[in-house]
Image (tube, coloured by chain):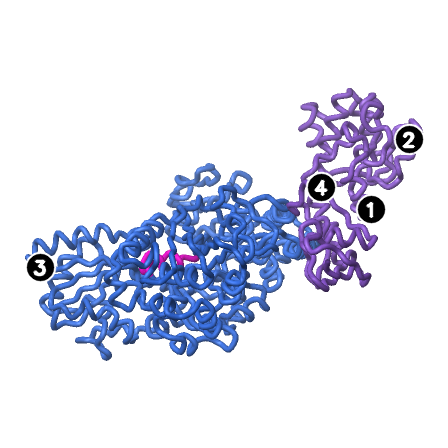
Chain colours: A blue, B purple
């Protein structure tokens, strides 16, 4: 990733001491603001004349909060999991030339005095930082930083081409929508371009709501101008006069940064009347949604901007009749960032990655039971195994992977023996999952798959807009049957009803929310049928998760009679005499699991 | 005008017509519930689904296109309609004996046409509303009994004795028991009636009765 490094070169040449602190929602939650304060204090105390630079996030969440120190004569060093009280020591030792606390250094290929190079770490080396190239390097609230890295050169290039030429370039790149369905981007643009209308709109869909997906937030918080540039290019290509960036209100920092970016772009003449001396006039508004999951769906998103919030039947598709009945193109945050990067760096840089049918790279969020949670940008077609075991560092010790949930609540569970699948749109679809926005939740062997399916169905049920019957009632009944399965009252016919009802909902629902909602149930039924059957027939939860099917017992051999469990039991279900083995009264036990946590000898077991 | 094929019959319809218009013009019928021609076509009930070029779509909303091949009925479509109808009935309070529609109800006639099971005899009874036997205090088991006999006994003024077997839905039982309790049908009388055929008794009948009447039973 030598290239990504050069991007920051404009800053590096200055011979001064620079401290970079990432300020994004994720690092702030980990305490980056306190680290920033203590950095300022430490610099004053040490009498160093340093520049504190706020950046976005690199996407390596397990390092949060990290800081980067840089001084002339020394390689830039990254320190991970920094606590406020460590800052002073770290800075002092760095200035003295002792980098032993650092996680990695940037730039030096072979490392520096035993500290490895960032490029030698697998989670960095195996990534292709294409669209996220600036994340963690530049100040997201500074347009100058973005311009220094080649920003808005893509817009300049696009404005020199004709509108059809721009669409042709996107067509040649083979870029497909990064929001989930993988619809060819150029095709949407082409349809909207061909519509005869004096007013057209482009909308950037930043309503990322899947549990376990945050790549759009990270991208827009760390490099908002790239998204904006892509939106302006899209607006130019279809002949739009107004653009919206639709952001969930639950991501206020993302909306703030995009608003700052819009203001700066206006000041620099990239937005407004007659952009860069051409006849193209365009303006952008950041729209904060109330945060309904269904608004990620195109027609619901449009309805939300219009002041309602319900899906409607397509066709007409938004590209012919969208916002206020005008032709509207809706693209995902990441798609638009890709557009900007394609125009900045040329087609070849983009098309050399990916598979035959899907070109380029995709950001994936790997969460759940892995050592290194984070956002990883890899070429499309990378194997799930590579992502989980090499980039994300595998599972915590002693755990083994049971399934990988791909694509959030609309996606499906891929079982462990299919980990060698390639991550692309078609492959995932044929195995009952979808790419979705790119969230991968790794599920280990301590989880019950029926419980996982129930979790996702509960989520979709709460987020269903309630307009069409199959989604409103069908998903509720799916949830009821799953509840029956997990409490051991279901019959074997119920499993058949689950499958038939699930398929019925997918076929006859109005929008994509209902059309994909049964995916978690159907995919777990397909790959983990034995687990469902064990719940139903044996009335047993093999992973010992479903509390109704689990009883707690005290192993009399291990129990030392300390009485800790009895003290902590909220239902007073444990009795016994000190020194002798205690007993759980199963009729009073509420199965809260407190005894299991408190027992110092591991005598409490789930049966 | 565009040409479309409804079950292989060629019809010509205006450019802006909906699939349902083409189906009607070809002389076929598709069941609908929420669709009101010219007033409401938000496609929410999903009963009118048909296949256009192999894709399942709601006919009341989907526009026609040149050369579209429309299939009005096949086994999959009928199954989907039945699933959706059952979902609708699952949220519907079946209280036919006191419903103002008196059996003139699209939901019931459609359920009967599509062969949805689990509706009470009341759904077929001509005595619904004010002349209902239950409302008049007779111990008629119509509210609890599976329909299909065309309500022969109540039609002739004699209370239903439940020979077709009882409905398995607990909700229906609760509502029916409430009705009986309100009309002071003696619970012992009811019990002897219910157990006449020994065909089905809900496992938790005692709990249901307690829930409804606060009477130990």
Classed neighbour count for the residue bearing mark 4: other residues with Cα under 10 Å, few (<14), some (14–19), many (≥20): few
Disc 2 from disc 1: Cα separation: 21 Å
Q: Quadrant of residue B207?
A: top right
Location of the N terminus of chain A by quadrant is bottom left
Q: Earlier in the sequence, mark 4 or mark 1?
A: 4
The residue lying at 49 percent from left, 62 percent from top is A445
Residue on which the image places disc 3: A49
Q: Say which residue label 2 marks.
A: B155
Count neighbours of disc 3 (C-alpha within 10 A) and say few if under 14, some if 14 to 19, many if 20 or more: few
Q: Which residue is mark 4?
A: B36
In three-dimensional space, the C-alpha distance between marks 3 and 4, rounded to whole angstroms, equals: 75 Å
Expressed as whole percent of the image width and height from the top left, the position of residue A358 reads 49, 72
Residue A234 visible (yes or no)? yes
Prevailing secondary structure of the magenta residues: helix
- Is A382 placed left or right of B33 in the picture? left
Q: Which residue is denoted by mark 1 in the rendering? A: B113
- Where in the figure is residue B106, as x and y percent of width and height? 78, 39
Mark 3, secondary structure of its residue: loop
> Do discs 2 and 1 share a chain?
yes
Judging from the image, mark 2 belongs to the subunit labelled: B
- Which residue lies most toward the left here? A47
Q: Which residues are magenta?
A: A212-225
Which one is nearer the viewer's eye here, A153 or A602? Answer: A153
Q: Are circles 4 and 2 on residues that touch, CB within 8 Å?
A: no
For the residues labelled 4 and 1, say whether their Cβ atoms are less than 8 Å apart. Answer: no
Magenta-colored stretch includes residue A216: yes
Residue at 45 percent across and 50 percent down: it is A604
Q: Secondary structure at mark 2?
A: helix
Report, in whole angstroms, how far the alpha carbon at label 4 lies from the one at label 2: 33 Å
Instruction: Please tell me whether mark 3 or mark 4 is closer to you in this view.
Output: 4
């Amino acid at each position: 990733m030598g290239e990504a490094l050069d991007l920051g070169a404009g800053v590096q040449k200055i011979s001064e001491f620079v401290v970079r602190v990432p300020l994004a929602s994720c690092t702030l939650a980990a305490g980056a603001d306190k680290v920033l304060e203590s950095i300022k204090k430490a610099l004053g105390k040490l009498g160093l004349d340093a520049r504190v630079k706020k950046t976005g996030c690199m996407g390596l969440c397990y390092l949060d909060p990290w800081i980067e120190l840089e001084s002339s004569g020394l390689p830039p060093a990254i320190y991970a999991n920094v606590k406020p009280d460590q800052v002073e020591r770290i800075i002092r030792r760095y200035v003295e030339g002792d980098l032993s606390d650092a996680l990695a250094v940037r730039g030096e290929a072979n490392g520096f005095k035993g500290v490895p190079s960032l490029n030698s770490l697998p989670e960095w080396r195996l990534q292709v930082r294409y669209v996220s190239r600036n994340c963690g390097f530049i100040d997201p609230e500074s347009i100058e930083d973005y311009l220094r890295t080649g920003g808005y050169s893509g817009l300049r290039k696009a404005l020199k081409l004709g509108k059809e030429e721009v669409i042709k370039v996107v067509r040649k790149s083979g870029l497909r929508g990064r929001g989930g369905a993988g619809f060819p981007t150029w095709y949407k643009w082409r349809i909207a371009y061909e519509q005869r209308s004096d007013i057209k709109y482009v909308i950037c869909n930043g309503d990322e709501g899947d549990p376990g997906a945050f790549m759009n937030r990270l991208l827009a918080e760390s490099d908002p101008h790239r998204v904006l540039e892509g939106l302006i290019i899209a607006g130019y290509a279809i002949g739009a006069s107004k653009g919206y960036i639709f952001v969930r209100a639950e991501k206020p920092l993302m909306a703030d940064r995009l608003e700052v970016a819009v203001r700066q772009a206006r000041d620099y003449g990239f937005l407004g009347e007659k952009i860069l001396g051409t006849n193209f006039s365009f303006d952008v508004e950041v729209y904060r949604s109330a945060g309904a999951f269904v608004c990620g769906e195109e027609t619901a998103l449009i309805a939300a901007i219009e002041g309602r919030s319900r899906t409607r039947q397509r066709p007409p598709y938004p590209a012919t009749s969208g916002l206020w009945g005008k032709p509207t193109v809706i693209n995902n945050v990441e798609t638009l960032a890709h557009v900007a990067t394609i125009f900045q760096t040329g087609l070849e840089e983009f098309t050399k990655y990916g598979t035959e049918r899907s070109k380029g790279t995709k950001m994936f969020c790997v969460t759940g039971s892995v050592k290194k949670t984070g956002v990883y940008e890899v070429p499309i077609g990378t194997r799930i195994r590579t992502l989980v075991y090499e980039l994300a560092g595998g599972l915590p010790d002693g755990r083994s992977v049971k399934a990988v949930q791909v694509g959030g609540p609309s996606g499906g569970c891929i079982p462990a023996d299919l980990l060698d699948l390639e991550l692309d749109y078609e492959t995932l679809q044929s195995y009952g999952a979808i790419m979705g926005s790119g969230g991968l939740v790794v599920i280990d062997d301590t989880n019950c798959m029926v419980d996982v399916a129930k979790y996702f169905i509960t989520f979709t049920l709460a987020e269903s807009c309630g307009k069409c019957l199959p989604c409103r009632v069908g998903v509720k009944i799916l949830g009821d049957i799953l509840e029956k399965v997990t409490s051991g009252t279901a019959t074997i016919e119920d499993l058949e009803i689950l499958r038939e009802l699930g398929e019925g909902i997918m076929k006859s629902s109005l929008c994509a929310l209902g059309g994909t909602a049964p995916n978690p149930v159907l995919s777990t039924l397909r790959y983990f049928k034995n687990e469902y059957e064990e719940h139903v027939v044996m009335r047993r939860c093999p992973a010992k998760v479903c509390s109704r099917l689990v009883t707690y017992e005290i192993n009399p051999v291990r129990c030392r009679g300390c009485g800790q469990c009895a003290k902590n039991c909220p239902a007073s279900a444990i009795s016994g005499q000190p020194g002798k083995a205690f007993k759980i009264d199963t009729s009073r036990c509420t199965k809260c699991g407190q005894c299991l946590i408190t027992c110092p000898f591991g005598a409490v077991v789930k049966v | 005008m565009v040409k479309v094929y409804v079950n292989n019959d060629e019809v010509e319809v205006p450019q802006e017509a909906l699939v349902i218009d083409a189906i009607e013009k070809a002389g076929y019928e598709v069941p609908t519930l929420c669709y009101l021609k010219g007033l409401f076509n938000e496609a929410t009930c999903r009963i009118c689904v048909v296949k256009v070029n192999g894709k399942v779509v709601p006919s009341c909303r989907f526009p026609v296109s040149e050369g579209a091949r429309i299939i009005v009925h096949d086994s999959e479509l009928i199954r989907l309609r039945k699933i959706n109808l059952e979902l609708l009935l699952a949220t519907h309070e079946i209280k036919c004996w006191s419903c103002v529609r008196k059996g003139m109800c699209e939901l019931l006639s459609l359920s009967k046409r599509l062969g949805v099971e689990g509706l009470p005899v009341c759904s077929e009874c001509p005595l619904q509303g004010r002349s209902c036997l239950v409302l008049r205090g007779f111990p008629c088991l119509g509210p609890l009994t599976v329909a299909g006999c065309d309500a022969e006994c109540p039609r002739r003024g004699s209370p239903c004795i439940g020979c077709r077997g009882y409905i398995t839905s607990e909700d229906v039982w609760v509502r029916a028991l409430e009705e009986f309790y309100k009309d002071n049908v003696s619970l012992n009388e009811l019990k002897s009636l219910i157990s006449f055929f020994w065909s089905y008794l809900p496992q938790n009948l005692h709990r249901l009765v307690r829930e409804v009447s606060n009477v130990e039973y």
